[in-house]
Image: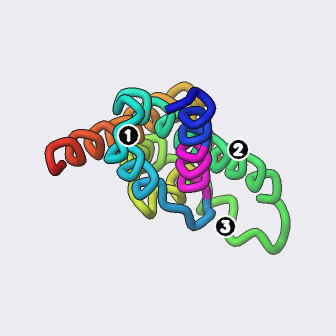
Amino acid sequence: MTGQAIFAQLATLFAAAFGAATVLPFQSEVVFVGLQLAGGIAPLWLVAVASLGNVLGAVVNYVMGRWVDHFRDRRWFPVRPGQLARAQGWWNRWGVWTLLLSWAPFGDAFTVIAGMMRTPAWLFLALVTLAKTGRYAVLAWVTAAAS
């Protein structure tokens, strides 16, 4: 396989993983498994590229959460200041750990909420990277075991 073909396949995987981490309806697992079964790229590269794309997609959600927070003083904003303060307290104590589920289909919402709740960026990145890389590593292992 040529270098261009490998690059194109990895770019496709990156785009699928990035899209899957945003609110867009993408599925990166199919692309990941297909590339792994095709055999032209080492699974470690697949895990690395898919994880990078998926984490960067989650960062987009985080930034969107930070951005939407600027509208909290608007009359139409669905959460009142007292409710937001209580939610922030809960999130800071327990909710941040839900980022370990950011790999799941509903996990995109947690990454947006993390931005709204002003989760420290380092903590967000650490938990999301652990979760998303772990998911792709398990997927690579299961695919290798099944093939």
For label 2, the residue is 63
Q: Residue 131 carries which label?
A: 1
Residue 133: x and y, percent?
Answer: 39, 35
Quick check: 25 above or below 53? below
> Based on the displayed image, in which of its 4 quarters is residue 4 positioned?
top right
What is the distance, in whole Å, between disc 1 and disc 2 at their CAs? Answer: 19 Å
Q: Relative to residue 131, is residue 126 depicted above or below?
A: above
Please provide the residue range marked out in magenta: 12-22
The earlier-in-sequence mark between 2 and 3 is: 2
Query: In the image, residue 69 lies at what x, y percent?
Result: 74, 52
Q: What's the residue at 49%, 32% (across, down)?
A: 1
Q: What residue type is labelled 3?
A: Val
Amino acid found under the numbered disc labelled 1 = Ala
Say which amino acid is labelled 2.
Answer: Val
Among the two numbered marks 1 and 2 on one chain, the one whose residue lies closer to the N terminus: 2
Callout 3 crowding tier (Cα within 10 Å): few <14, some 14–19, many ≥20 = some
Q: Which residue is drawn at 47% across and 54% down?
A: 28
Q: Do residues under tags 1 and 2 come within 8 Å of each other at their CB atoms?
A: no
Count of labels shown? 3
* Residue 125 relative to residue 71: left or right: left
